[in-house]
Structures are given as C-alpha cells and as structure tokens.
Amino acid sequence: MLIGSYSFTLVLISLCVAILASYTALDLTGRIATAKGRAVHFWTAGGALAMGVGVWSMHFIGMLAFKLPIDLGYDFALTALSLLIAVLSCGFALWLVSQPKLPLVQLAFGALIMGAGISAMHYTGMAALRMTPGIDYDPTLFSASLLIAVGASAAALWIAFRLRQHSPYVRLIRAGAAVIMGVAIVGMHYTGMAAAQFPDGSFCGATLNGLKGNGLDSLVVVTTLAVLSIALLTSILDARLEARTADLAHSLTVANRELTQLALHDPLTSLPNRMLLDDRINQAIKKVEEQGGCFALMFIDLDGFKPVNDAFGHHMGDQLLREVGARLREDLRSQDTLARIGGDEFVLLVRLSEPNDALSLAARQVGLIGRTFRVAEHDLQISASVGIALFPGNGANAQELLMNADAAMYHAKGGGKNGYSFFDASMNTNARKQLQLLQDLRAAIEHNQFCLHYQPKFDAANGRPVGAEALLRWKHPLHGMLMPDKFIDLAEKTGLIIPMGEWVLNEACRQMREWYVLGYTDWRIAVNLS
C-alpha cells in the first residue's frame, strides 16, 4: 500500500480558503436577501461562481497538498467537471437560503442535495488522478465523509439563512460562523482523503497529459483569492451603497413628510390650513352625497383678540392662539377637523347625526373659548363669534359653505359677539356686499384711489401749528368718499392692509417733504398703522 503525506503549508492554506469562501457565501446571502428585481439573479449567479470556486479551490489545494511516492497529475476534463459541480451546488444553496422561509423538511432536502454535490465534486476530483489500479475507499471513512458533507451542508444552509438579514454585530457573527463552516468543509475533504487507499504498484494515468508541475498550487491560490476578494469587496461596497441609498431615501421621506406638513398645516398651531380644510370639506360633501347624513361648518372668530395682541405683543398673541387651538382640539372627535385659516379665525368641520345637533355644539365652542386662558402668568379673557353653515342646505361646495359660514359669523358679531348664528339666505346680501367691497378695495390699491386728509395739531401753550395727523380716505368711484371704518377691518382680514399701509407712509413722507421745503422744518406728521 502506497503511503501518502501532506504539505502542512498547503493544508493550512486550504483551511483559510475554506473559511474565506464560507464568509463570502454568508455575506452574499445577505446581498441576495436585500436585492430586488434583476439584481437577485446577478448576485445569485456571481455568488454561485465565487463560492463554488472557493469550495473547489479548497478541495484542489488539499489534493495538491497530498503527496505519494509516485508522480501525480490531474485530468483536465474531470477537474473542470468537479469545478462545475461545485459551482452548481453552491448556486443551489444560495437559491435555497434566499427563499422567504426555510422549513425543516426543505432544509433536510437541501442538505442532501448540497452534500451530494460536494461529495460528487470531491470524488470526481479524486477520479481526475486516473489511478491504475483504481483507488480503494475504506467503507467507514467513505460513509463518514458523506455524513460530514450532508451535516456540514445542513449547518451551512441554516447559518446562512439565519444570518442573511443585517443586524448588530452581523459581520462578527458571520466571521465566527465562517470558521465553523470552513472547518466542517475541510473535515469532509480530509476524511474523504483518509478513506482513499492506493495499492502498491499504482501509477497515475493523468501524469502525462494532465495538470501538474510546480507553481500550480500558487496559481490556484492566487486565482481563488482574487475571485473571492473581488466578490467580497463588491458585496461590501454594494451593501454600503445600499445603506447610503436607504439613508437618503429615509431622509427624502422625512423631508417630504415635513414639506407636506408645512404645505397643509398652519405653522403656528399645527392645525390644518385652508388648503387641507378645502380637501376635507370636499370629502365630507362626497360622503354625505353617497351615504346620507349631514355636517356643519363653523366659522369661529375670536372677540377681543386684537386688544390682547396690542397690549402684550405678538408673542403673547401667538401663544394665545396656540392655547385656543389646543382647547378646541381637545373637544374634537377623530372624524372632525379643526383648521386655522388666518389671523384669529378658526373653522370647525363636524359630522352630525341631526342638523339640530349643531346648536349644542356651537354653544359648547363658545363656552370653551369663554373660559379664562392662562398664558405666561397672565389670565386672559376673550370670547368667540361663531357662524354656522349646514350641508346640505347652505352651499353646494367648499367655497360657498365657507362664505356663508363667514356671513353668519359676521351676523353673530353684529348681534353683540360672544354667541353663534346659523346662516340664513338673507345674509347673502351682506356677504355679496363684502365680496364686492373686497374686489373694489383691490382695485383701489391698484388704481391709487386713496388720499390723505391732514388734521392739524397745535401747541396748546401758544396756539402755533406743530404738525398734523394723516387720515386715510377712499375716493370710491361709485360711493364717493369712504371713511376708514368702512374698509379697514376688511383690509386687515385679507392682508390688503400691508400695501395700503406702505402707500400711506410714502404719501405722508412726500407731503412732509413739501412742507419742509416751504420752511416748516419743525412740523411732524403722525401716521396710524394697523
């Protein structure tokens, strides 16, 4: 019987290659699990090639580490076949662990297939020696190698499936698992080698035309390390790119959520704004038309807010608005909508069982706002005027409902404030007047229909003039000269007070300059600003 020996260096290299191939396989299973579309097939094919080359290389280096007293060579065709078997077996393994689930029966079947593939690779590689007479195998060790192959395959499949998802310390765990898998694969190989028996007088038929010679082991090692390193680096870089892409996608999602919040909500109170309110009203209209029922739109305007704002400043006014919004929101149901549409104006959209339910609800809103607010160590008392429009009945769309609820609110405010009023068709006349006045006011700013009257101011001690107070008047083309009480409130509500105030300041300064040139250098002009 021919006695063989091993190169310790090549045995150690084969173990290192097996561990590296195992780690690469585990890492690639993670890439396959997170990939989508065609990328799944790409990673499966590339992983099968890299892992197959790694496993086969471990086997071939182990073969090269084995020495007999005779020259050895390896049949090229059978060696290539063993490589193909390794690649196909590894491809099957990667496909199996990429499935959503891996039940015990499927794991056992996969272990049998993969174990058979690894065993076929090993013994096909041994057959590549083309020994004459043929190699005898010890039945016990031969069976043990097959069992080790199946057991190692089962362990490898289970570990790869469990570690395919990214988790804390996953790379460290994969490294430990790769060592276990590598030792198991090497154990199967050298158990199979130990089972081989070479009778005296045997010679290698692949010596003349097969693979042989010094440097073959180095070529296999370098090539294998290059393939595994490229596959591993590609996987790591792709994982980092995917992580960065995921972070970017998360950042974009957060940014879009914030933009949506800003676009559809009031920045001061975080309540829905006019745009979102319109959408909610249209949804409510559609639901009522399909399922029946009714809803109320309540236009809430705060009474006494402006004096608080003027006396304590805008910061206090803003805080009061937040408190009002918070108090009204506490009384809401999930299907109701409370919106702030500007200034001290809120709109409440509520589903009703009966139209008459709006009466008690409006009274409750007035009562809630009428309770004292504690803001920055100040007790503040305000009230609310509420206008109510019902659907169906008081408008066909969101714009009409809002306009009619606004008209009802003005009616409540005109009736003494701190109360509520239902919309009535007779209020449309006043609403139309307000709408027409708003259009005329915009035209007045554009066509310069305003003028300033100056009320002189005198020194009480000597009776000498010391300046004047600028008083705004509107030269309306149809209604003649209008006093500020006819249009200032509307200008403040619509924001037109800003360009109007700018014009007043410019005109007062122009007039003051004229008086200055005429010698009235000590005169001063007082201008009222909203």
Image: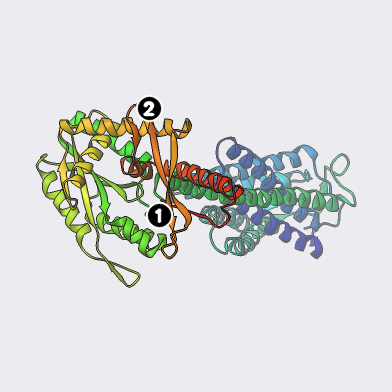
Choose top left, top right, bottom left or bottom right for residue 3: bottom right
Mark 2 neighbour class, 10 Å CA radius: few under 14, some 14 to 19, many 20 or more: few
| Residue drawn at x 37%, y 54% as measured from the top left | 269
Identified by mark 1, the residue type is Leu
Nearer to me, 420 or 63: 420
Residue 201 coordinates in the image, percent (x, y): 82, 51
Nearer to me, 226 or 322: 322
Identified by mark 2, the residue type is Pro
Give the residue furthest to the front: 462
Is residue 186 shown left or right of residue 217? left
Tell me the quarter of the image containing the N terminus.
bottom right
Quickly name the residue at label 1: 268
Indicate whether 17 appears above or below 312: above
Quickly name the residue at label 2: 477
Q: Which mark is residue 243?
A: none
Nearer to me, 45 or 367: 367
Residue 38 coordinates in the image, percent (x, y): 59, 35
Distance from disc 1 to disc 2, alpha carbons, whole Å, reads 39 Å
Residue 19 coordinates in the image, percent (x, y): 68, 59
Is residue 513 shown left or right of residue 526? right
Indicate whether 180 appears above or below 488: below
Is residue 9 shown left or right of residue 520? right
- First reached walking from the N terminus: tag 1 or tag 2: 1
| Residue drawn at x 26%, y 30% as measured from the top left | 432
Give the residue furthest to the right: 214
- Give the secondary structure at mark 1: loop
Task: Please identify, in this view, whether the residue under mark 1 or under mark 2 is nearer the observer.
Answer: 2
Instruction: Kindly tell me whether residue 398 is visible in this rendering.
Output: no
Nearer to me, 47 or 145: 47
